[in-house]
Image (cartoon, rainbow, N blue to C red):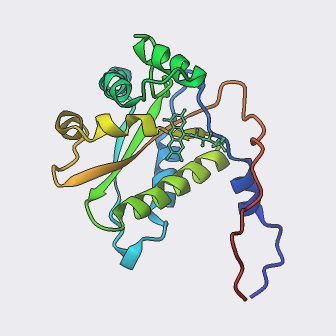
Amino acid sequence: MIFMMPNSVIEVIKSRRAIRSFEDKPVPDSAVETMLEAATYAPSAINIQPWKFTIVTKKEEIKHISDIAKPLLLQTLPDIADEGLIRFRSALANPQYNVFYNAPLVVFISGAKSTYAINDCSMAAQNMMLAAYTLGIGSCWIGTANLAINTPKVKADLGVPEDHEVFAAVIFGYPKGGFPKAPEKRPPQILKRID
Ligand SMILES: Cc1cc2nc3c(=O)[nH]c(=O)nc-3n(C[C@H](O)[C@H](O)[C@H](O)COP(=O)(O)O)c2cc1C
């Protein structure tokens, strides 16, 4: 089937940006609902739809998880004199630094451990980020939280059952100063084409 309408999905995909600076303004529940619904329309292996969501807007809880994440992350960084790493290490040692960039909303996506749950939940996360962008809401996946969000204490705080894993932490909020232009992306690297 050939679609003749202008392809707004491609435009949305191409102009979404990771946003790390937010206005001090909450994300309305109606927007959260739209984003969550978009997440549930993601494909999943054998349509198992493993995703479960924890919505956190409480600043103290977000900071608490960030404070658990920072020392865990510091331990994993290689001890080499790389300029970026040195900057990152000093940011992580700064009590003011928040791995969630003081975003007004963090959504954690978890699921029962299974072969494809990480893929399914990542699909759901991308759907959420694209849906957010169409609502004027910025987002950024926060991989630096990964270690912290799978500690028993944080999982319990987030209502995540012990036999589940938290696959994604994504921040949302209205971007301070609007959306910057999408960064330069490399063209696809095609290793081989077998026709
Ligand atoms: C799995 C994953 C983990 C990420 N973790 C972080 C993170 O911890 N902190 C951060 O600032 N950005 C993080 N990002 C955002 C990337 O840095 C960002 O997507 C990339 O620089 C490309 O920019 P763009 O999203 O504006 O195209 C992460 C993105 C992905 C997909």
Q: Position of residue 35 (x, y in %)?
A: 51, 51
Q: Residue 116: percent from the left, percent from the top?
A: 36, 67
Residue 180 place in picture, x, y as percent: 75, 34
Q: Quadrant of the N terminus?
A: bottom right
The residue under the point 40% across, 10% down is 95
Q: Residue furthest top?
A: 95
Quadrant in which residue 127 is drawn? bottom right
Above/below status of 120 relative to 165? below
Residue at image location 48% in from the left, 23% down from the top: 102
Numbered disc total: 0
Q: Residue furthest front?
A: 80
Q: Residue at x 45, y 26 (%)?
A: 99
Residue occupying image coordinates x 43% and y 63%: 119
Q: Position of residue 181 (x, y in %)?
A: 78, 38
Q: Is residue 81 left or right of residue 166?
A: right
22 lies left or right of 180: left
| Side of 16 relative to 54 (left or right) | right
Q: Which of 12 and 80 lies nearest the eye of the viewer?
A: 80
- Location of residue 194 (image quadrant): bottom right
Q: In what quadrant of the picture does the C terminus appear? A: bottom right
Which quadrant of the frame does ligand 1 lie within?
A: top right
Q: Quadrant of residue 183?
A: top right
